[in-house]
Image (tube, helix red, strand yellow):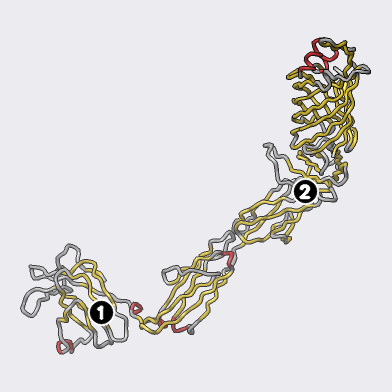
Amino acid sequence: MYLDTSDGRAQDTTEINIYRSRDGVPAALVKVIVSGAEGVTFDDAIIYNDAQSRQQNASEYWLWMADNSNSVKITVPGYDPLPVKFPVPVVRVKKMFAYVLKIHVPDKEMAYGDDTKTVRIKITPLDAKPILSFDSYNPPLTDGEAVVTLRKRTGNKGGEYPYEVTPLGDLKYKSETGKLYFDDIPKDYLHKIELKPIYGKLRVETEPSSVSASVYENNKEIGSAYTDIEVQAGRHVFTIKAKGYKDYVDTINIIEGNTPTKMTPKLQDFNKFTFKSSPSDAKITIRPINKDRSLGDSLNIGKTHQADLTSGLYEVTAEKDGYKKKIEEMELMSNHPEVIIKLLKIFNYKNEFYAEGNFKAGTFMGFGATVGAYFMNINAELAYLIGSGKSETIYWSGNNTPPIGCTYTPSTNFTFKLGYGIPLSNRYRLTPQVGVGMVKLKESIEEGSGASPADGANSMMGLVGVRFSAAIANHFGVSVSPEFGFSMQKSKGFEALSAVSSDIKKWGEGFNVKLGLTATF
């Protein structure tokens, strides 16, 4: 519908007439023509001409509209109501002029209210990722299928419903357009649309050019290098395979048409490398080292210890329980396809228990045993030794008693130490230690005397030392433990004896070395 005026005034043409109400007042009028219908009614308007005055032209209605009206609803029996909105409001004019409005109502805009049909539209293939536009709206697609409702319209074959399918996937398909006509389809109709692919060409030119290479997509061979291969236009992931070379994988966008899209892969040769380890059942993992020194994906060699690899720089890892893990950067070359890896057996564990027999030398000589343990390299050790040696004769005397001659031996030596083990290799370990120790004297008295003036005299000392251990074989080794003792507390008897005997004094302090034969568990 449009308003046939340009400046707001009626134009002085034969098309323009001045319309007035019955009382002679100018009124805003709208003429409506409804062909072949009776019983037409109008909301928001009054019919100006009655049925008698419409005998000459029964389909012509003149409506009297209130000032500033901008819409009217037209109802024809058997049809949906038709709302009509004017582009400008209609008004009376003071100079005996009127607006002329021409209403154009397409036939298909009036539809039967209950006459409907349901249509399922199935679009294939799904990888086209289609978008459906149906009668100017986009119904949702589920697994490529949409459900739409058609309503009967007046006009050609009960109404025309245009549609368009637009593919948006990585692979290219032709758009599809068409029309559905209400009278041509049954109820609950399935309309199938199969999109047609758009093709292009691929040409693979390898480097080196002398190799015979095949082209694969989705693990299916589709052609050979140096030939034009017809494929669907769009994005593809291709794999180039050639004997003696590493597979080459790349994503290529194929252009539509007869001009081939070129793919120029540089193939890398590879050989079957054999990895030999000692022990033979070690687990071996390799990772390529990229130019920027970053590491590629790891590859577990497996029980065969064989792998097809290109020449280059790799990080090789070998490991087995009871052996030191080995990580080594290796340059693998095709002319040396055999790689030998030797692992060192671990004899010093972070967690282990040990027992040893000892010989001690220094301030006095002794023999004994030591038990100890490592827990996460933290060391605790307890030792018991029986000393040897004999002091000079020392005479004790008192009031009205004859002197008594006595000799003394460092009969008992206890030590307790804590430390931390530092592995020097798979066989050697150094353990700094601190602790405390005690020396207890045994007294020997001349015959005939019942006195024991200083039997059991003792001295407590602090200890600072280091334990150096070496594994000779599995569960067997040796140790050397130099230590220095400084006096902390002496009994009265030991203090009195130290004052008169240099031998006894040095038993309570000084430098010692303990040697051991070790068994580990």
Q: Which of the marked residues, 1 or 2, is nearer the chain's N terminus?
A: 1
The dot on residue 74 is 1
User: Does residue 8 lie above or below 288 as drawn?
Assistant: below
Q: State how far apart marks 1 and 2 are (Cα).
A: 81 Å
Question: In the rendered view of the protein, which quadrant contains the N terminus?
Answer: bottom left
- How many numbered markers are drawn? 2
Residue reaching furthest to the left:
23
Closer to us: 291 or 169: 291
Image coordinates for residue 197, horizontal then vertical, percent: 60, 65
Q: Residue at x 9, y 73 (%)?
A: 26
Amino acid on which the number 1 mark rests in the picture: Ile
Residue corresponding to mark 2: 300
The dot on residue 93 is none
Closer to us: 174 or 171: 171
Residue 327: tell me if it is visible.
no
Closer to us: 367 or 389: 389
User: Does residue 177 lie above or below 348 as drawn?
Assistant: below
Image coordinates for residue 31, horizontal then vertical, percent: 20, 78
Amino acid on which the number 2 mark rests in the picture: Asn
Label 1 Cα crowd, 10 Å radius (few <14 / some 14-19 / many 20+):
some
Image coordinates for residue 151, horizontal then vertical, percent: 40, 80
Name the side, left or right, on which 301 lies relative to 2. Answer: right
Image coordinates for residue 475, horizontal then vertical, percent: 88, 38
